[in-house]
Image (tube, rainbow, N blue to C red):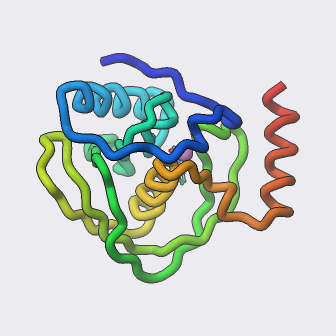
Amino acid sequence: MNKLDIKLYPDEILRTRCKPTEMSDEIATLIDDMLYTMYEAPGIGLAAPQVGRDVRVIVADVSEDKSQPIALVNPEIIATDGEIVYEEGCLSLPGIYAQVRRPAKVKIRGLNRDGQPVELEAEDLLAVCLQHEIDHLNGVLFIDHLSTLKRNRLLHKYRKEQL
Ligand code: GNR
Ligand code: NI
């Protein structure tokens, strides 16, 4: 297992639209390294662009005891329902947090680590986390869901703290 470096905002890879990928040994290794990196961070999710790779790969584990790793390749949200407001943070924007409103339930289709097609229904924290990770694959950060005023306030605080 390799611990990968996490890219920080404003690294341009965080604004890149990532490419669909086929499953391969290389992608399986990337998944393993991303899970290890996520647990070490620690975080509840991680997307490939956060470790410098522009491919559509995400991992997550929202369980208490870190026993339920999820990995998805080319994930797509195929249905949503409800609404939830949750305080989000991001390993690529350390130190800033904000309330974000999103659908509370999502149905997601993708490939698992074995390259098999899977469908997954998620709600609450897992739904929030998977949407946050899929946003990363499209170059979208949680601050993009805020008003311009709130986003600018947070970015000002972030720039001050990063120096
Ligand atoms: O570790 C993380 N915690 C978190 C909390 C609320 C909503 C989303 C997240 S994901 C984040 C890790 C991360 O930056 N993933 O991209
Ligand atoms: Ni993030």
Residue 113 placement (x, y as % from top left): 19, 41
Residue 142 placement (x, y as % from top left): 62, 55
Residue beneath the point at 66% across and 40% down = 93
Closest to the observer: 41 or 71? 71
Measured along the vertical axis of the image, is residue 147 above or below residue 75?
below
Q: Is residue 58 visible?
A: no
Residue beneath the point at 13% across and 41% down = 114
**For residue 30, side relative to residue 113 (left or right):** right
Measured along the vertical axis of the image, is residue 119 above or below residue 94?
below
Closest to the observer: 99 or 27? 27
**For residue 119, side relative to residue 134 (left or right):** left
- Image quadrant for the N terminus? top left
- Judged from the image, the quadrant occupied by ligand 2 is top right
Measured along the vertical axis of the image, is residue 116 above or below residue 41?
below
Q: Residue furthest top?
A: 2
Based on the displayed image, in which of its 4 quarters is residue 122 positioned? Answer: bottom left
**For residue 124, side relative to residue 35 (left or right):** right
Residue beneath the point at 70% across and 36% down = 10
- Image quadrant for the C terminus? top right
Residue beneath the point at 33% across and 41% down = 66
